[in-house]
Image (cartoon, coloured by chain):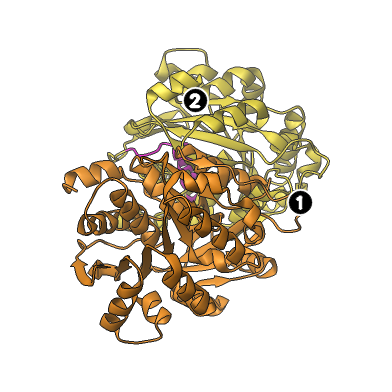
Chain colours: A yellow, B orange
Amino acid sequence: MTKELNVTGIGNAMVDILARCDDAFLVGAGVDKGIMQLIDMDRAVDLYGKIGPAREVSGGSAANTIAVIAALGGSTAYVGKVKDDQLGHIFAHDMRAIGGVYETPLAPENDPQETGRCIVLVTPDGERSMNTYLGVTEHLTADDIDPEQIAKSEWIYLEGYRFDGPESHAAFAKAIDAAKGAGTQVSLTLSDPFCVSRHRDAFRKMIVDGVDLLFCNRAELLSMYETEDFDAALKTCGSEVSILACTDSENGAYVVANGEITHVGADPVDIVDATGAGDAFAGAFLYGITHGADLATCARMGNLAAGSVIAHIGPRPEADLKALFKDANV
Amino acid sequence: MTKELNVTGIGNAMVDILARCDDAFLVGAGVDKGIMQLIDMDRAVDLYGKIGPAREVSGGSAANTIAVIAALGGSTAYVGKVKDDQLGHIFAHDMRAIGGVYETPLAPENDPQETGRCIVLVTPDGERSMNTYLGVTEHLTADDIDPEQIAKSEWIYLEGYRFDGPESHAAFAKAIDAAKGAGTQVSLTLSDPFCVSRHRDAFRKMIVDGVDLLFCNRAELLSMYETEDFDAALKTCGSEVSILACTDSENGAYVVANGEITHVGADPVDIVDATGAGDAFAGAFLYGITHGADLATCARMGNLAAGSVIAHIGPRPEADLKALFKDANV
């Protein structure tokens, strides 16, 4: 059966505020380097007042992933909540402009929060340190999940970050139920090592119960299995999901399936801004798997897309990914 | 007498919405290529719905100029109106983050308009076509002009675009009066050939009455003097202002002062996005003139800054202009 949509992603709908700074600024401003930290509106206002001139671009981890799939020509939908404010309009415009379906109801006007935003501070080494004010995107509920849309999708893609909200567990459960009942496969990204530490048990249960494809990076995998033994973690996790795709920075990625671990190396890239690298990897991998590529090729596509995104400031690809893949014969 | 501020700029406070498109899109969407066209909110919404994914950055012609002066280490102030909305906060943040003074009162909440924005469409040849919804920035009045701030400035810089508003003539007159009474010099940019055709007589009167330094490009100068004879226009204009700085795209710039025309060539640059090139020229020129540079060096600085801005998407410099000037021995 051919389904109408390749992938429906569910995640935090955010606008990124991207600014450069040096390491001393991070220390002075109390920002932990390289991770995603949740902040409230007061902290967002305070931190924003301290940073230099910035640019605003639509972000959100799963939304970035969906943007990559759409850029490659895949058919997509996205579920994530914004408000009827200027940043919400920017996010919705960019989501629809890529050609995907985006119909999540706006947060009501009386919601005291605004559209979520992420202050992304990029240091000269290309590392990004994220400061996320969730705003209304935290208020995604099971009501926002449309089982029919999920049934129309070959895959759903769940963003681990979205677990940071009171009703998100129910929303994810509803999405997984809808998927399982309709032959839709389930993928999940662990998002961030500290996100894993906040939700380890819930993630573990989801993985064992019904995740077909798990995305993570080395730090997230080690956090998930509370070990320093990477090989052991790959093996354990590989026995719990059908496919594990674990990125490992400049070392490329590991794919584990049917008890076999395959390493797929990445070409060296000058890192300008690491924002969105993992998201792009997942997007290209999902594009590959929904377009008949074998798993090693999916990982190669993932490495290429990630390499393209980290070569410039901003979380979504600016280069022509289709042409890039063609040149690389994938 | 040393004044506290090098330059106070007055102009349209805008957030730019930058997107790439091809020439066919411009034709299909009814956008005139290469110029600035004023649009209303309905048109802004319609056009925004048609363009691809975009990025948002603070813009506004005089604001970009002020950002260049500040980036070079000059002391600046800016006057331009935004509203207490998310785009207004972005503009104000970026203006203050460069280190300049920005204290223009916000438009009141009951103003039916929003913060102004400019949909900038960048074609593969690097040309930018601007679609400006002025919003509240049109509501700058003489009340927003602080004569004391102007008296503290060595120069004021008036943006021709800002003449597109009911009370702007009075605001500019007040600013010029304050300048003349305090030994502050007056500079003006003609902004755009179609802006010139809308305000030719008023601009001409301002030039003859009291502009010390006029910025324009070739097309604007020809429009101003309603001629096709560039040399004649340079001479006529040069006899009406103390200093004329006229840019001529890849051919660099002409400076006219004391009856002498000096050509200052520019190094070749790959044009990615022409947005902000003229603004950057004016900013670097004003930095030069307030820091003891001769006029030819001011023009060279202007060419270098313009070349830096057109090498990337976005209207404000991203490279280290100070280092660039040092390398070029200016």
Circle 2 residue: A35
Marker count (numbered): 2
B321 or A208, nearer to the observer: B321
Q: Residue furthest front?
A: B181
| Residue B128 included in the magenta stretch of the image | no
Q: Nearer the viewer, mark 1 or mark 2?
A: 2
Q: In the rendered structure, which amino acid carries the disc numbered 2?
A: Ile
Q: Which residue is mark 1?
A: A148
Dot 1 crowding, Cα within 10 Å, few <14, some 14–19, many 20+: few
Q: Position of residue B194 (x, y in %)?
A: 49, 77
In the image, residue A275 lies in the stretch drawn in magenta: yes
Q: Which residues are magenta?
A: A271-287
Q: Position of residue B212 (x, y in %)?
A: 37, 62
Nearest the viewer among A252 and B301 is: B301
Query: Residue visible at 48% across and 32% down?
Result: A258
Residue B148 versus residue B32 in the image, above or below: above
